[in-house]
Amino acid sequence: MDFLRTYYREEVGKLAQHYPREQKSLYVDYRDVYQFDRDLADDFRKKPDVMFSHFENALRLYDLPVDVTLDEASVRIYNLPDDIVMDVPEVSRHENIGSLLAIRGQVQKVSQVKPRIVDATFECQRCGTPTSVSQFGEKLQKPHECQGCERQGPFSLDSSASTWTDHQSARVQQPPERTQGGEGETIDVHLKDDLIKQFDAGDRVTLTGILDIEEAGKEHKRDFDTSMDTRAVVREESDYEDIDVDQHMDRIEAIAGGEEGDPYELIINSINPEHFGDDDVKLAIALQMFGGWSRDGKKRGDSHILLMGDPGCGKSTFLQAVNDLAPRSTYASGKGATAAGLTAAAVSDDFGDTEWGLEAGAMVLADHGVACIDEIDKVNGNAVSSLHDALESQKVRVNKAGINATLNSRTALLAAGNPKEGRFDPYQTRAQQIDLSPTLMSRFDLMFMVSDSPDPDLDREVIDHMMKSRRAAAKKALGLDLSEEERQSIEPEIPEEVLRAYIAYAKEEVTPFIDEDDNSTQEYLREEFMKLRLANGDDEDNPVPVTYRQEEAIERLAEAAARIRLSDTVTKDDVDRALSLVKKSMHQVGIDPDTGQFDADVVETGQSKSQRDRRKQVLEIIDDHDKVGVEKVADIMETDVDKVKNDLQQLKNRGKVYEINDGELRKT
């Protein structure tokens, strides 16, 4: 009582004024208890059930200035010292059972809210005498005998005379970026009364509560599961609370200011240093991790990148590098991925017999970070369709089994995959060989094609770099001295912990945009985009393929480039970096396999103008000639047979052509 009067007189008065409709609990800072009486704080740690009972009893006996009784009010302790706040894997230890502790983690799944009985009143079916039984654990406890006739029932539950509370279960996991690969450990938590619906799947939280053992179904086993009886919930205010930016601030400012060299080159050399070359991909990934500025959640600032290419070209190593570097990240494989695994879904869970829960997938768990999805070409159709909204609006909507929820997925996607046939076909455009729907492809700001084409000079450099990095790794493991060249082959220019803090600080503190007073930058971006948009618009038969999505992509990437300099102002140089990447991406996807030249039409339609014209000619030849086959068509066109075969296959796929006896071709 003395503690409440000394430290929380005003808070108790506010609770009395708003109890019970607007406020039902008194939040008490653990550090205040510790300052008042260290022994009292220590008792809270060791005997929390007893101490909560004493504090809540003191609250009920408090002399209030208004005519209110706080009989059902709760006391909620929060803000435990950092040495008591645990990661999820540290919690389920026998020494923690029955103790007050705090868990920091990410919400993987939440159940629906259901009524839970606290004190059950039963009516004897023989004499009608009511008997009250306090409830503990998961199973409903009935009276042993009637207090009136002293018989053993039967009894029926009197719901109107019983005491109830609202109840919800949740599963909290170790955040993905802190699991060092694999799925994070989890713990189930129970919430009741005014703690329900305090968070959604995907949220980062710190929960204070008491560690319990789960006894149901364990009568004949020595091993027990654990869960937390939650007493307080605090959602994280900062996106990167676990990162100590202050420790690295001097180095971050030195890098951003150019004191150690070109910051862009330093970051490029710090991403996947064991992978030789592909500096454009590394710069794009760097800009993706820093990100552009999101405008009130209505305009996304995150850039999405797709890496497509032949097997063995190192695409997955980029995803793993980003998963290790990004302050927040998730990693998933497209093989067998479900909609719940990639975005979120209502799923049947194990919180109850017929319960449905809301489960977060990779895009939601990586909120404000990067989701890395490997083998995206192998993701099933339903899961891919669930990505559309998550990529553009950065929201995931779930409507199933009575659950209607909208979760945040303010996430950049770095995806990798292989061409449809495993390797690129030289007779088809690259865009045709990406086994993704055009609508999903349009969500990517950048697409890079990583092909394995023999090049003697480049191959020698790659092999030398591979041998050098492998030798350097062995020498480092043996404690031998490394040359500067060897060190650079395996060690990043900027240490991982510094770069991670650098990204976190830039995303939290820097809000870059093109200043309205900077006419030169605005005009430069406008004119350069118009050149892209009208790149091959001089042909009347060719639609303008470059959409305004590319302009938004350029702005996002330019803002990210400014963030690397820790600048709130986007300059022409930032726009140039963004333009260079967008142009290279478009040219890689939009190369006409016949001419070897860029055809912007390929970017949007997957088909070049020369292919479209040639296939039109194939149809005309089939229409004009009887009993014509592949060889004859190729002979008339004076072109390669394999090229004609490819065209005919595309026409067959579109239902334009069919074959009859002996390979004779007919138009449909």
Image (spheres, rainbow, N blue to C red):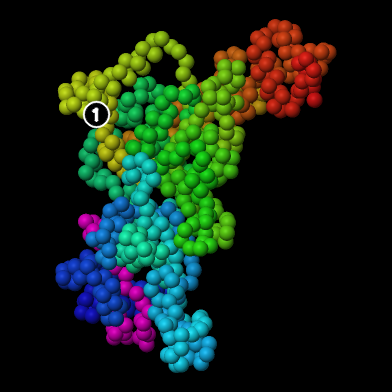
What's the magenta region? Answer: 59-85
Residue 235, given in percent of the width and then of the height, sits at 37, 58
Residue type, label 1: Glu
In the picture, measured across the screen, residue 168 lies left or right of residue 88, that is right
61 magenta-colored: yes
Relative depth, front residue between 633 and 265: 633
Residue 640, given in percent of the width and then of the height, sits at 65, 9
Residue located beneath label 1 in the image: 260
Residue 427, given in percent of the width and then of the height, sits at 60, 17
Q: Quadrant of the C terminus?
A: top right
595 magenta-colored: no
* Label 1: which secondary element: loop
Relative depth, front residue between 109 and 299: 109
User: Where, by quadrant of the figure, is residue 432 drawn?
Assistant: top right
What's the residue at 36%, 40% (across, down)?
181
Residue 40, given in percent of the width and then of the height, sits at 19, 72
What's the residue at 28%, 53% (across, down)?
90
Q: Quadrant of the N terminus?
A: bottom left
What's the residue at 33%, 37% (across, down)?
325
Q: Is residue 235 above or below residue 455?
A: below
Q: Is residue 69 visible?
A: yes
Question: Furthest residue to the front?
Answer: 220
Q: Is residue 548 above or below residue 39?
A: above
